Amino acid sequence: MRIVLLGAPGSGKGTQAQKLITEYGIPQISTGELLRAAVSEGTELGNKAKSAMDSGQLVSDDIVLYMIKERLQEDDAKKGFILDGFPRNLSQAASLDTLLAETNQPLQGALLIDVDFEVLMQRLTGRLSCENCGAVYNRFTSPPKVEGTCDKCQNALFHRGDDHAEVISNRLKTYENVTSPLVNYYKNKGIFLSVQGVGDIDEISAAVKLELESAKIS
Ligand code: AMP
């Protein structure tokens, strides 16, 4: 399976990607996660990316492309991948196509997780994560049992720096203006798929699976 997950910040791409990893045994490649790791390790690329990330803007294409190219060359990506958060604009999408053409492994699908703006705002402003085990909670919709503490490992929960109201609004605007044109890009290529991303997580996963199966992607 070689697919891209499309969707605004907070649409649940990451959650659905996790489900697909378990189901299909291929890696999720998230540029957001690669970038956050580079920032916390203080690498040169991380330092360059930090200010754009902190303000909710996109990091420059060369940084992201360099990272994705390296990551796609790792062994686990040879049998397929789920790209999450990449591509984020038309130029990244074209670069990805070129990159995958070199190994004769074109994308098979671009799946949009579709969610309304109001729901995205609530999800993002309430999001809490555990840095230790990766669990994700939401203050409004799925709070932890004890405020501020992870149910699974009892670590303190944190609110991502780019999950604050003004930055969130920037991230959503960037999505609308720069990323959403990818829908037409992939429609024109005949590989666009979509599911509604609201409701029970397992029901959304079932819809994702069905959509992939009906496009004969496995
Ligand atoms: P995410 O976790 O996917 O929401 O990404 C967090 C932040 O990392 C974004 O707001 C951007 O600043 C940056 N980022 C992630 N992926 C990309 C990408 N493909 N191109 C440019 N910037 C990105």
Image (spheres, helix red, strand yellow):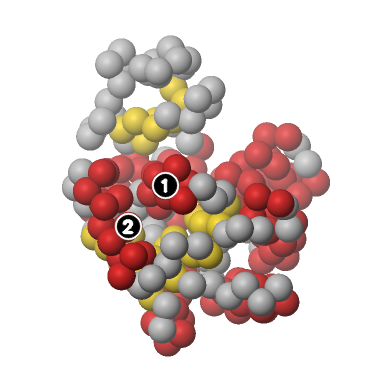
Kind of residue sitting beneath label 2: Lys
Q: Is residue 138 above or below residue 80?
A: above
Residue 182 image position (x, y, % from top left): 45, 75
> 152 or 159: nearer the eye?
152
Q: Which image quadrant is residue 106 in?
A: bottom right
> 120 or 102: nearer the eye?
102
State left or right for residue 79 relative to residue 199: right
State left or right for residue 214 relative to residue 111: left
Badge 1 is on which residue?
23
x 72%, y 77%: residue:
102
Residue 175 image position (x, y, % from top left): 43, 64
Badge 2 is on which residue?
209
Residue furthest toward the bottom? 188
Q: Which image quadrant is residue 212 in?
A: bottom left
x 38%, y 58%: residue:
8
Residue 107 image position (x, y, % from top left): 53, 72
Circle 1: is it few (<14), some (14-19), or many (20+) Cα within 10 Å? few
Residue furthest toward the right? 44
Q: Pointer 2 and pointer 1: residues touching (CB < 8 Å)?
A: yes
